[in-house]
Structure formats: C-alpha cells, structure tokens
Image: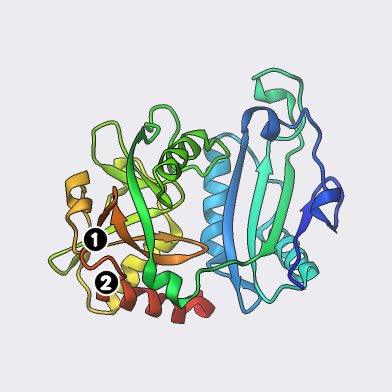
Amino acid sequence: MPASRVFLSTIGRPLDPADAAVPVLDRGFLFGDAVFETLRTAGGRPVAWTAHTERLRRSAAGIGLELPWSDAELRARVDATHADTGNADSLVRIVVTRGVGPLMLDPRRAVTPTLAVLAVPLDLPDEAGYVRGLRARIVDVTRVPATALDPAFKTANYLPNIQALRQALAAGDDEAILINPAGVVAEGATSNVFAVLQGVVYTPPVDTGILPGITRAAVLDLAGKLGISAQESALHPFDVRCADEVFLTSSVRGPIAVTSVDGHPIAAGTEGPLTARIRRAYADTLATF
C-alpha cells in the first residue's frame, strides 16, 4: 500500500505525516523563510539528484541561509525516507527553513535550520492523460520581478503562483501561465513553458524572470540529441495561443502537452507529434540522470 513519510531534522527519523510537526515560531511557517526542491524517484533513485542539490544550495545562498548538511547526508535522508514509505517510487520534497526565531523579521536570531524531507506516493498521468494533456490559461497575475525576489531562487514564497493557479482553476483549467511585468510569457505556476512554432521548439529565456527548471534544461539538451531545433526566445501570449504545439515541463510529470489555452484548442486539441516524441525520449532517460 503506497504511503507517505516525513523526515524532520528535529526528530532524526522518518515519521507518519500526522506525527510530524514543526514549532509555530519556525520562520518557514511564519514568513516563508525557506527554500525547497521537488523531485521524483525512478527505480527508487532520485532523478537528477546533483542538479537538485546544486539548485537547493544556490537558493539557500541567495537568501543567506547556510546548509549544515553535506550532499551525502541529504541523500541519506532522502533515501531513508523514500525507503520507509514502501513505495516503488515517490514524489520527494526537500524543505530547509531558517529555523526557529523570535516573532520578528530580522533573520539573524535563527541559527539552526530545520530540514524536512517529505516522500509521498508518485501519482502521474497515465498514457491517455498525457495524450489528453492539460488546459492552460494565461492569467493576469504577473511573475514577481527579480528586483523583488530573484526567480532563480526556489523559495517557499509561492502565493503569487497560488493566486495564478486559483484564477486558472476558477475558469475550469488545469494550469496557469504567468506573464512578466513586460507582458511576455514567463512560466507556468508549477512548470516551464514550451511552444512549437513551424517545427521549432521555443522556451522563454531565463532573463524573462523564470526559475531555470531542471527538466527544462534536460529537454533542451534532449531536443538537440533528437535533431529537433530548440532555442530560448521570448514568447508573447499570442505566440502561445497560436502555436502548433504547447507543452509544460516539471520535475515530477516531465513534459506534458497543453491542448487548450484560454479555452481554445491548440492544433487538434491533443498531444502533438513533437511533444510526444520528446516526452517518450525523456521517459527513456529517467534512469540515467
């Protein structure tokens, strides 16, 4: 039976989520003063482990948070937590908060970070779900500008993404696509965006204000190996609405088609041929990185 388990550094072993708790004065709870990574396992092994730990450390450094655990120690916590679930594969989230401190913004009074590793059953679309794809909506919630919070840091401050997704869900769609303050497409609420135009795969460049996704990078590399032209280029909402194909990437689902945007079908309203080719090739690589 699939199960969920949580490792807390304050306890030192995996627990049932119902028994796992952090203090109310933890800054992750109070202020979103935390960084995280979400990944999946394949064959019981974390996918793209090195890339995820490197980004976790960059995010932590970006907010002035020193991680006291080595990569080997983090991996041991992830492996133990996943193993304790009994799942064949799990969705894993690694969260590091600045820890407990007084009820004030000043971060200097919190000196002991808290580590939480959550492992839950991996729930992916079936083949029909990937072919059917997602309905996306370009929302009017803009991506937080880099002058406020660098989008390259994966922090727990996710309210703009939640607000964007709420707007899409209220319209009957599955995912939100955010634009940046300049009006160009940035990213999905939980994903990176790709559009296929006249046989070329485009994705917004990092300087549009996106999180440089690990699966995004893998897909750009994979497209080159498949002989598919792919490049980073600014996309306007019109480009996405009129694209031949649109797909999103994330570390859990991998590439997945978007088959309607703002209520209008993309091409035939089903997964396109380039998206399908990239998705299947990506699935074949999961065990190798």
Q: Residue at x 50, y 76 (%)?
A: 286
The image's mark for residue 164 is: none
Query: 279 or 76: nearer the eye?
Result: 279
Which amino acid lies under the numbered mark 2 shown in the image of this protein?
A: Gly
70 vs 85, nearest the viewer: 85
Direction from residue 106 to residue 83 in the image, left or right: right
Label 1 and label 2: CA atoms lie apart by 9 Å
Q: Quadrant of the N terminus?
A: bottom right
Q: Give the structural element (helix, strand or loop) at label 2.
A: loop
Up-down: is 200 above or below 183?
A: below
Residue 232 % position (x, y): 24, 55
Residue 251 location (% of width, % of height): 50, 61
Farthest left residue in view: 198
- The answer to the question of whether label 1 and label 2 lie on touching residues, with beta carbons closer than 8 A, is yes
Mark with earlier residue (1, 2): 1
Residue pointed to by mark 1: 266
Which residue extends farthest bottom? Answer: 284
- The quadrant where residue 24 appears: top right
Against 189, residue 272 (above or below) is: below
Q: Which residue is mark 2?
A: 272
User: Which residue is rendered at x = 65% and y = 20% of the image?
Assistant: 106
Residue 129 location, x and y as percent?
45, 70
Q: Position of residue 230 (x, y in %)?
A: 23, 65
Res. 236 visible in picture:
no
Residue 60 seen anywhere in this rendered image of the structure: yes
Q: Quadrant of the rendered structure where residue 46 is?
A: bottom right
Count up the numbered dots.
2
Query: Given the image, on which type of amino acid does mark 1 rest?
Result: Ile
Q: Is residue 266 left or right of residue 281?
A: left
Q: In front here: 74 or 15?
A: 15
Tell me: 89 left or right of 271: right
Dot 1: within a 10 Å radius of its alpha carbon, few (fewer than 14), some, or many (20 or more) residues? many
